[in-house]
Image (spheres, rainbow, N blue to C red):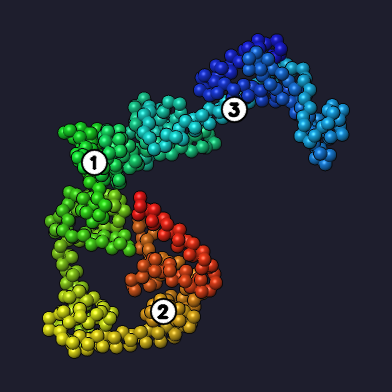
């Protein structure tokens, strides 16, 4: 096939038709044609030559040209496509490095093999352009809901026709045991869009909490308008879900607005989610109040919150225990996901038994260490004293406020407590030295003898050893394995050391050793303080 003998406008008409069919820019198709013709021309004139083709966008005329580039003498590698400055003077008056000499060459006749090769180049470039177009179109739709049609099923994964592309709904993103037939309409959440070798992959989900949130946004105008906000969502797909909402307009009830007239709004979401039961909960800034709401329909008697461990204990009436836990732990698990806290549930009887055991343990502690009778020990526990440090170093007026305690009694108790603590400290320091703990660590401010003994038992014997520790190694922390939170015990956790305190001690040790520049710490502290101020203002 000779380009010169063909209808020149046919190239433009073909480019327009392909671009319209694939919904891409016609200029991309013409560029692909230019590349394919250039490749065919190289097979005729020589692969070493730099042959370029330009198709006129108005007439369709294809111009073939040989291009030679001016390079430095030592950079000359290809005599067919490059020239030195000296050689270029035959063509140009004042040649410069990088100048190009363009000579038009006769068009080529495309043989059968060359035409087939050109066709493959055009198809490949068109496919790449189509993939780029699909990626650009769908990447901005992450976080939205798409409607599509089931195209086929592959190994449990559903391939969905979503208009100008395909989406994949993987097996673990389907609700329960739902199944689809070819041609079924399907609605799903766009979880991710990624570039892959075979083209852009649009990953869909029907189990993501965001899918439920997006459905509510579609059904509840107040959420779409920003009057009501969904603060958190937790799902056991196909079975049960909890969603926390807050209203920024005092005249609008967030729960009632999400439920709708006779449950119409929530029922529309339930129907889409295969009958998944949904608890709509008012969100509250107070953690304890929010948790009480999250454990509905169970009633809660008392909440005890441990901020350091992000752990919370909930006390419920004995008859409410099974309701609070839910079938297979579902209710408490969803409440935990919703609040982001580890929740321990106790019955009132269990909590009472534990309090009695703690009372007896503390009473025994005071009887053994202070050499007092049971009645006096119980008085101390009843007044809220939990350890010897509190008795030894509390203001004496607090002891005098206890019925039957005079100055001599209070003074004697404090003296005994201090003597006992000093003796324990002496023994702990002696044990630490026997374990090999060096003076560099013993003299480090902020560590008690008992802490030094615990560190020595764990092989931390020098200031250098201490400085290499991580804060969670000292204070303890939590890690997540296979979706389950696991407790990591800290060396000094039993001394009620927090992560912030551990971090401060470790950084101080590093500064003392010269590992860290103290000015960097000051800059970081100022930055943290500025961030905290911005958060408070927000």
Residue 105: x %, y % from top left: 77, 20
Residue 469: x %, y % from top left: 46, 69
Q: How far apart are the alpha carbons under marks 3 and 1?
A: 56 Å
Query: Dot 3 surroundings within 10 Å: few (below 14), some, or many (20 or more)?
Result: few
In the image: residue 441, left or right of residue 361: right
Say which quarter of the image contains residue 370: bottom left
Q: Identify the secondary structure beneath mark 2.
A: helix
Residue 162: x %, y % from top left: 41, 28
In the image: residue 299, left or right of residue 49: left
Q: Which residue is mark 2?
A: 452
Q: Report the disc number at residue 249.
A: 1
Q: Identify the secondary structure beneath mark 1.
A: loop
Residue 427: x %, y % from top left: 36, 86
Say which quarter of the image contains residue 83: top right
Q: How far apart are the alpha carbons under marks 3 and 2?
A: 70 Å
Residue drawn at (56%, 30%) of the image = 128
């Amino acid at each position: 096939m000779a380009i010169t003998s063909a209808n020149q406008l046919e190239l433009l008409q073909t480019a327009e038709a392909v671009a319209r069919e694939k919904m891409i820019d016609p200029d991309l198709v013409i560029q692909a044609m230019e590349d394919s013709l250039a490749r065919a021309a190289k097979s005729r004139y020589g692969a070493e030559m730099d042959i370029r083709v330009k198709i006129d966008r108005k007439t369709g005329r294809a111009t073939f040209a040989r291009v030679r580039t001016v390079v430095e003498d030592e950079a000359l590698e290809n005599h067919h496509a490059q020239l030195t400055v000296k050689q270029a003077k035959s063509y140009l008056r004042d040649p410069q490095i990088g100048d190009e000499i363009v000579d038009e060459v006769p068009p080529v006749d495309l043989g059968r093999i060359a035409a087939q090769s050109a066709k493959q180049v055009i198809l490949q470039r068109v496919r790449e352009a189509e993939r780029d177009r699909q990626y650009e179109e769908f990447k901005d739709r992450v976080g939205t809901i798409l409607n599509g049609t089931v195209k086929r099923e592959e190994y449990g994964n559903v391939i969905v026709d979503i208009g100008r592309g395909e989406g994949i709904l993987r097996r673990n993103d389907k609700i329960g045991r739902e199944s689809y037939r070819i041609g079924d309409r399907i609605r799903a959440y766009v979880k991710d869009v990624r570039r892959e070798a075979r083209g852009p992959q649009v990953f869909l989900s029907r189990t993501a909490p965001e899918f439920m949130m997006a459905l509510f946004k579609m059904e509840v105008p107040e959420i779409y308008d920003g009057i009501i906000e969904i603060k958190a969502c937790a799902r056991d797909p196909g079975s049960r879900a909890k969603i926390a909402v807050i209203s920024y307009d005092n005249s609008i009830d967030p729960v009632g607005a999400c439920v709708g007239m006779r449950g119409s709004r929530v029922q529309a979401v339930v129907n889409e989610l295969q009958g998944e039961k949904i608890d709509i909960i008012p969100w509250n800034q107070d953690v304890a109040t929010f948790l009480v709401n999250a454990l509905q329909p169970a009633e809660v008697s008392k909440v005890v919150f441990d901020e350091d461990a992000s752990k919370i204990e909930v006390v419920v009436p004995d008859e409410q225990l099974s309701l609070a836990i839910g079938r297979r732990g579902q209710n408490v698990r969803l409440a935990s996901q919703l609040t982001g806290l580890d929740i321990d549930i106790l019955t009132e009887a269990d909590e009472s038994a534990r309090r009695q055991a703690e009372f007896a343990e503390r009473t025994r502690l005071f009887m053994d260490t202070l050499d007092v009778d049971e009645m006096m020990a119980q008085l101390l526990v009843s007044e809220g004293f939990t350890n010897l440090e509190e008795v030894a170093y509390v203001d004496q007026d607090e002891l005098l406020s206890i019925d039957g305690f005079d100055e001599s009694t209070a003074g004697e108790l404090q003296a005994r407590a201090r003597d006992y603590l000093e003796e324990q400290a002496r023994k702990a320091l002696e044990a630490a030295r026997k374990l090999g703990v060096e003076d560099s660590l013993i003299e480090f401010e902020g560590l008690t003898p008992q802490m030094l003994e615990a560190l020595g038992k764990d092989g931390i014997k020098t200031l250098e050893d201490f400085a290499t520790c991580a804060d969670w190694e000292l204070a303890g922390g939590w890690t997540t394995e296979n979706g389950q939170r696991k407790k990591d015990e800290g060396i000094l956790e039993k001394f009620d050391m927090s992560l912030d305190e551990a971090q401060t001690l470790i950084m101080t040790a590093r500064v003392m050793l010269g590992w860290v520049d103290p000015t960097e710490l000051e800059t970081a502290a100022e930055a943290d303080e500025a961030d905290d101020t911005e958060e408070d203002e927000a």
